[in-house]
Amino acid sequence: MKRIVIFASGSGTNAENLIKFFHNTEDASVVQVLTNNPHAKVLDRCKTLHVSALSFNKIAFTKTDDVLNILKASQPDLIVLAGFLWKFPENILNAFPNKVVNVHPALLPKYGGKGMYGMHVHKAIVDNNEVETGITIHYVNEHYDEGAIIFQATCEVNTNDTAETVAAKIHELEMEHFPKVVEKLLS
C-alpha cells in the first residue's frame, strides 16, 4: 500500500477529493494531511474523513527539522501539495527527491511564481485576455512553480468569463485529473 501525505493551506477540496479517491483502493491511501494554517477548513474535512491532520508554523517548517521528522515518521511514497502556499524547504526536498508534486491553476510556465495562486492567477488570465488556461501538475523544486511538468489539462477562456468562472473551470479540471495523475505516479 503506497502512502500519500498532503500539504494544504485552505479549504481542502483537492485534499478531500484525493482522500475519497484513494479511500476504497488497495493501492494507496492518504495517511496524513499537514497544513500551515491552524484555521484551515481542510482540518475539518480531515476530521470528518478520519484522516490524521496537523498544523505547523513557519519555524517548524523552515528553521527546524520538525516537519521533516513528521514526514520521515509517515514514510510517504508521495507528498502532494494541494493548495499549499508556502515555498517548500530544501531539507524536505532533499529527503524526498522527486516525491513532491504540486497542482498549479494555470498552464506553466505562464502565471507561475511567488504570489501567483488562486484568484490572483485567474484574475491575471482574464485581465490579459487569454483564450485558454488550465492546470499543471509538476514536481516541486527549490523555486516556485519551476519543477518538471508531469501533466497539463486545458480549458477555454471566453470573452465573458470572470475570474470566478475561470476558477470554477479550473476546479473541475483539478477534481477530474489530479487524483488520476497521483495514482499513475504511484504505480
Image (cartoon, rainbow, N blue to C red):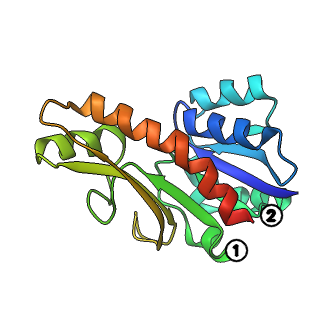
Q: Which mark is residue 95?
A: 1
- Is 32 left or right of 18, judged from the image as shown? right
Are discs 1 and 2 less than 8 Å apart at CB? yes
Vertically, is 93 above or below 27? Answer: below
- Could you tell whether 65 is left or right of 61 in the image? right
- For residue 181, the mark is none
Residue 34 lies left or right of residue 108; in this view the side is right
Mark 2 lies on a secondary structure that is: helix
Q: Residue at x 27, y 41 (%)?
A: 122
Q: Residues within 10 Å of mark 2 (few under 14, many from 20)?
A: few
Number of numbered tags placed on the structure image: 2
Q: Residue at x 21, y 39 (%)?
A: 123
Instruction: Give the quadrant of the N terminus.
Output: bottom right
- Mark 2, residue position: 72
Q: Earlier in the sequence, mark 1 or mark 2?
A: 2
- Across and down, in percent, residue 63 comes to 59, 62
In front: 172, or 77? 172
Q: Amino acid at mark 1?
A: Ala
**Can residue 54 be spotted in the picture?**
no
> What percent of the width, then of the height, locates residue 81?
57, 52
> Which image quadrant for residue 113?
bottom left
For the residue pair 148 and 34, the one nearer the viewer reads as 148
